[in-house]
Amino acid sequence: MAKAQRKKASKKELIVQKAACMFREKGFPATSMRDLAESVGIEAASLYNHIQSKSEILQYIISRISDDCNKHLDELENAGLSGLQKIDSVIRFHIQMMLQKFEDYHVMINEWIHLEPQPLADFISQRRSYVQRLESFVSEGIAAKEIKPILPYVAVLTILSAVRGLEFWHRSQKNYTPEELEENMVTYLIGGLKSN
Amino acid sequence: MAKAQRKKASKKELIVQKAACMFREKGFPATSMRDLAESVGIEAASLYNHIQSKSEILQYIISRISDDCNKHLDELENAGLSGLQKIDSVIRFHIQMMLQKFEDYHVMINEWIHLEPQPLADFISQRRSYVQRLESFVSEGIAAKEIKPILPYVAVLTILSAVRGLEFWHRSQKNYTPEELEENMVTYLIGGLKSN
DNA sequence: CCTACCGATCGGTAGG
DNA sequence: CCTACCGATCGGTAGG
């Protein structure tokens, strides 16, 4: 019984993982349940023994990765760091998520529009509050004169978007190491924030 | 006859414009020809008097906006600017495209994956050469010691991605003016490049 | 986990 | 530009 449950859980995990991979490659609407079933190695109808619906899979992928982001932020708030240090940590965190949980992260930032109305509304409000927390870090840094005067909103949008560029590295021949990418991008994005 | 042609051309333009709007909102695969026809005000079958296929519309939208980007770069090469000045111009150009031709630009950067094999291959190779030209500007700036030592590839990915963040401003209540956005983002992205 | 199948909708065509 | 319709495919269910 316990074993059967574990087996079922891991099968669901396999389905979700394959789904993330395909949603990233072709997008959510262009991925059919038949494609997904084939890549899992079963018939389409059999998927429904493990999941409720196609959109439930999307919801699951997105909510677990966005929970990771929020958890990181919670830990950060109590670490006694300066505004700039917190932003530094956020940048590195997102770069690492992009590199290590590429499929899930990519699906979150590119396919969230296809969530059902309620999960969509939840995601949007979560995202807004996440952005606002980052804005407050920038504001702290400006008040402490370690960050140059800049609209915090623009700084946060820039940072969160910049990381998406790593998608192209991920697709390409990978001429650089993840460490090089991280160091160079942090140098750029932190360098642009520092007051002279 | 001339008038009929003009009328037909403008009808096609209307279809393409509405399509760009819907592709941006819901994505290319999730937009049906029936949805599109309704927003144009005709029956789905009638669309095919003006366009060949759904994917031809996507191709048309993407190639005309990517031509704009390449044209800007050609003009820039002969203006006698420094590497940093050229990068400055590229950043401002992309911000303005994002704000002024929002639908087309958005479709290009988010829906290009759904191009047919041949147009897709063309787009990818065009994009690669575009990125390489920008990298050479960064390299020039580094050689001239006006730009800090940084991997040009990472700098270019960061810049091109950062602009995508303005999508969220475009969706939101628009608390800031386009000028504020442009100045702040340029301050950030150019500030991060300058050598101290 | 499969076979068999559902109603809906898709991009696109024929013919006028 | 419309009506009528095509074959294909979609997400999902019934029943075993």
Image (spheres, coloured by chain):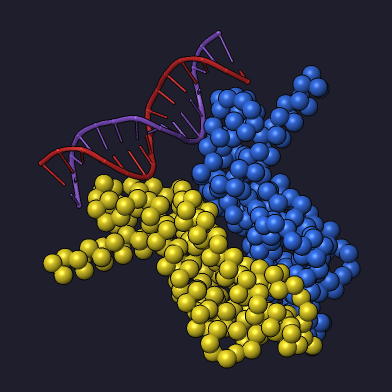
Chain colours: A blue, B yellow, C red, D purple
| Left or right, residue B145 beside residue A57 | right
Percent of width and height locating residue B35: 36, 50
| Left or right, residue A104 beside residue A75 | left
**Rendering quarter of residue B61:** bottom left
Q: Nearer the viewer, residue B36 or B159?
A: B159
Q: Is residue B36 above or below residue B86?
A: above
Residue at screen point 58% across, 52% down: A112
Residue at screen point 47% across, 77% down: B71
Quadrant where the image shows the N terminus of chain A? top right
Q: Is residue B26 above or below residue A39?
A: below
Percent of width and height locating residue D16: 55, 8
Observer able to see residue A136 = no
| Left or right, residue B37 beside residue A84 | left
Q: Nearer the viewer, residue B9 or A137?
A: B9
Percent of width and height locating residue C6: 40, 22
Q: Is residue B141 above or below residue A54?
A: below
Number of labels in the image equals 0
Task: Please identify the residue farthest to the bottom as the structure is shown.
Answer: B80
Task: Please identify the residue farthest to the right as the structure is shown.
Answer: A80
Residue at screen point 76% across, 88% down: B145
Q: Nearer the viewer, residue A145 or B73?
A: B73
Percent of width and height locating residue A151: 66, 79
Quadrant where the image shows the C terminus of chain A? bottom right
Residue at screen point 31% across, 52% down: B52
Q: Is residue B19 above or below residue B82?
A: above
| Left or right, residue A156 beside residue B170 | right
Observer able to see residue A6 = yes
